[in-house]
Amino acid sequence: MSSRSKIGHYDIVSELGRGGMGVVYKGFEPQLNRHVAIKTLSESLANDPTVVERFLREARSMAQLNDPHIIQIFLVGEDQGQPYFAMEFVEGESLSQKLKRESRLDPAEASRILLQVAQGLAMAHDRGVIHRDIKPGNLMITARGHVKVADFGIALASHDTGKKLTGTGEFVGTPGYLSPEVCLGKPVDQRSDIFALGIVFFEMLTGRMPFTDHSPLGMMLEVVRAEIPDVRTLNDSVDPRLVAILNKMVCKDPEQRYQDCHNLIADLIAA
């Protein structure tokens, strides 16, 4: 790791994580006396115009979404030829970390988290942005229980979904949270995010994933063909109204699912 002390006008405090695309740092902005998260594109990819475009597209997708349940983008810049963007830093943990610690959540708490994610996604979908990688690792929870959706890394504006940005055959999304239409290579819209969020809801209620095949292909076949296990056999404290909401979120056929997050939100509030 190159031990950088600054990126742009931000002081680097620590490294938060790294992946194929680059590194995320915790930074400090002295002028405004606040911490930020800084996502950098790895130096090896900074020369590839397609990848740079995808990286900047992520920043732009998120920048147009001003919602309390979506992580805010503050700035897009370049430092020593390396593109980066700075965004809101969440003091807290991801849902993934919370589930590792607590295994499963109380149904009322799971519903509160689901509602907040749905509110953030409703805003994104209304602006024509589909997230495409909803999973517990991308849902941040503050110390006060406020939920924010992170990492629109493979988000596409819905009018772009016809263009494949990912290179031939490259997989978009995370196995286990993919909708049947993604697995089948069909067009993807906001209902695909709702399916993935249903899988997250199942996981919060039961402490496990509904589809468990170890091979990506076997997993995709399960997603397309197998019904999810009955949530009440795994957690009998789940209210029938929540079971109905979950089942509607994860219907194989997108036409049978919630068509948008607004209807999902209405049912959650009524439940």
Image (cartoon, grey):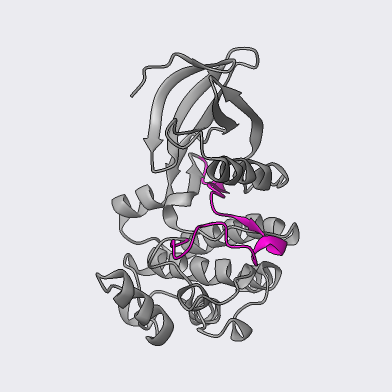
Q: Which residues are magenta?
A: 144-172
Of all residues, the one furthest to the left in this rendering is 214
- Residue 236 placement, left or right of 148: left
Q: Indicate the quadrant where residue 208 lies.
A: bottom left
Q: Nearer the viewer, residue 96 or 60?
A: 60
Residue occupying image coordinates x 37% and y 83%: 230
Q: Where in the figure is residue 174, as x and y percent of width and height?
A: 41, 61
Q: Is residue 211 something that shows in the picture?
A: no
The image shows residue 7, relative to residue 55, as above or below, that is: above
In the rendered structure, does residue 254 fall within the stretch colored magenta? no
The image shows residue 145, relative to residue 128, as above or below, that is: above
Question: Which part of the image, by quadrant, shows the C terminus?
Answer: bottom right
In the rendered structure, does residue 149 fall within the stretch colored magenta? yes
Q: Indicate the quadrant where residue 157 lies.
A: bottom right
Q: Is residue 264 something that shows in the picture?
A: yes
Residue occupying image coordinates x 30% and y 52%: 100
The image shows residue 219, relative to residue 151, as above or below, that is: below
Helix, strand or loop for the magenta stretch, by majority? loop
Residue occupying image coordinates x 44% and y 13%: 5
The image shows residue 66, relative to residue 103, as above or below, that is: above
- Residue 221 placement, left or right of 47: left
